[in-house]
Image: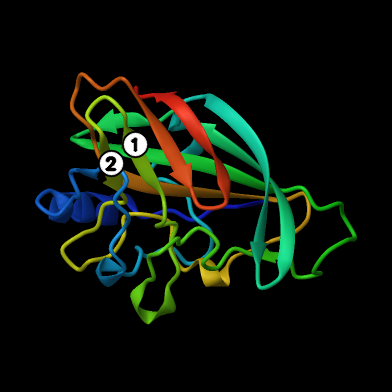
């Protein structure tokens, strides 16, 4: 079973438009997300999925396995990264998480994503978001943080405190960034608690 939540196309258009002048265009290499800039995510009710249908995404370009911890519990995950694509000055990252816990083991309600991937960011109203990610542009020595709209809401899967992924089930999450310059053809993607995806091609 797959847990998927999307921003509506209308909401996506609005948030992208509002973000045009607010996107973090780049930070010096080694800088960290500002905790004071934490904000809520979009209108996701449970889980996350990038705007558009799954079959519109690029193929999976990398897969890693990792163990994430939350509240003292360790969960084995498979993380599949779909090829990021540029569109109207933005880059959207889509990932699919699979809870590798054997069926019948672990918490019966499943793994609660909550703030596992929030990093140093925290959302208002406790709407935890897929917000601790960043793109690393090695060519220009810049980091690109998750974009936000005029209401300081992350353009990313949100309300993750309400998302529980049971053993052997999946959840799709997304995060949107301001696009690096056109001559940047690959970036590194960092997700809290997950091994770095290096040299990811930008479509």
Can the viewer see residue 51 in this picture? Answer: no
Q: Is residue 59 above or below residue 115?
A: above
The tag earlier along the polypeptide, 1 or 2, is 2
The reply to whether the C-beta atoms of the residues labelled 1 and 2 are less than 8 Å apart is yes
Q: Residue at x 34, y 36 (%)?
A: 136
Q: Which quarter of the figure is the C terminus placed in? A: top left
Determine the residue located farthest toward the left in the rendered image: 21
Q: Residues within 10 Å of mark 2 (few under 14, many from 20)?
A: some
Which residue in the protein does label 1 denote? 136
Q: Is residue 159 left or right of residue 77?
A: left
Question: Quadrant location of residue 86?
Answer: top left
- Mark-to-mark CA distance, 1 and 2: 8 Å
Which residue in the protein does label 2 denote? 29
Q: Residues within 10 Å of mark 1 (few under 14, many from 20)?
A: many
Q: Position of residue 190 (x, y in %)?
A: 45, 43
| Marking on residue 84 | none
Q: Residue at x 73, y 57 (%)?
A: 75
Q: Nearer the viewer, residue 137 or 129?
A: 137
Q: Position of residue 93 (x, y in %)?
A: 41, 39
Q: Is residue 118 above or below residue 193?
A: below
Q: Residue at x 45, y 60 (%)?
A: 119
Q: Nearer the viewer, mark 1 or mark 2?
A: 2
């Amino acid at each position: 079973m797959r847990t998927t939540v999307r921003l509506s196309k209308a909401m996506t258009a609005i948030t992208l438009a509002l973000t045009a002048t607010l996107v973090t265009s780049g930070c010096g290499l080694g800088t960290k997300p500002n905790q004071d800039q934490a904000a809520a995510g979009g209108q996701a009710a449970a889980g996350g999925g990038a705007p558009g249908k799954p079959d519109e995404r690029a193929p999976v370009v990398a897969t890693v396995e990792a163990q994430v911890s939350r509240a003292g519990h360790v969960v084995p995950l498979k993380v599949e990264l779909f090829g990021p694509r540029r569109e109207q000055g933005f880059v959207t990252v889509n990932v699919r998480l699979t809870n590798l816990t054997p069926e019948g083991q672990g918490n019966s309600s499943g793994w609660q994503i909550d703030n596992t991937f929030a990093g140093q960011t925290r959302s208002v109203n406790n709407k935890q978001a897929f917000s601790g990610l960043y793109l690393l542009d090695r060519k220009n020595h810049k980091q690109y943080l998750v974009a936000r709209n005029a209401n300081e809401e992350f353009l990313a899967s949100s309300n993750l405190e309400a998302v529980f992924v049971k053993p052997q089930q999946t959840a799709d999450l997304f995060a949107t960034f301001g696009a690096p310059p056109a001559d940047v053809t690959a970036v590194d993607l960092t997700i809290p608690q997950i091994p770095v995806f290096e040299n990811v091609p930008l479509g």
